[in-house]
Image (spheres, grey):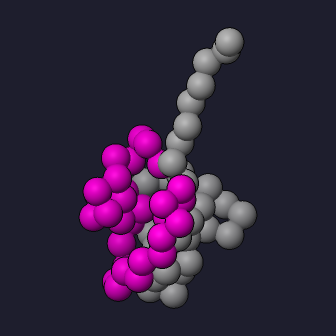
Amino acid sequence: MRVHLHPQRRTVEVQGRRRVGQLLTELGILPGTAMVIRGEFLLTEGEVLEDVDEVEIRAVISGGTG
């Protein structure tokens, strides 16, 4: 599968079927700190990704009021 990492502007290829949570762990990303997006859909940690998938991983940014 093709994984686009933002804001790093890096793309990696990952082989094999796995759950979203497993992918994040393998990439060294804490699950609560990132959103995984396939097409127009936000994925949960338990959803399964296939070899043919293309996903985007975006850092979760939180902010307060000024």
User: Residue 42: within the magenta?
Assistant: no
| Closer to the camera in the image, 11 or 24 | 11
From where the camera sits, is residue 47 visible?
Answer: no
Q: Is residue 27 above or below residue 58?
A: below
Q: Position of residue 40 (x, y in %)?
A: 72, 64
Q: Does residue 49 appear to the left or right of 38 in the view shown? A: left
Q: Position of residue 56 (x, y in %)?
A: 56, 65
Q: Position of residue 26 (x, y in %)?
A: 27, 64
**In terms of image quadrants, where is residue 20?**
bottom left
Residue with the most extreme top position:
66
Residue occupying image coordinates x 67% and y 14%: 65
User: Residue 6: within the magenta?
Assistant: yes
Residue occupying image coordinates x 32% and y 63%: 27
From where the camera sits, is residue 51 visible?
Answer: yes
| Closer to the camera in the image, 42 or 59 | 59
Q: Is residue 65 above or below residue 26?
A: above
Give the residues drawn in magenta, as a range: 5-34
Q: Does residue 23 appear to the left or right of 26 in the view shown? A: right
Q: Quadrant of the C terminus?
A: top right
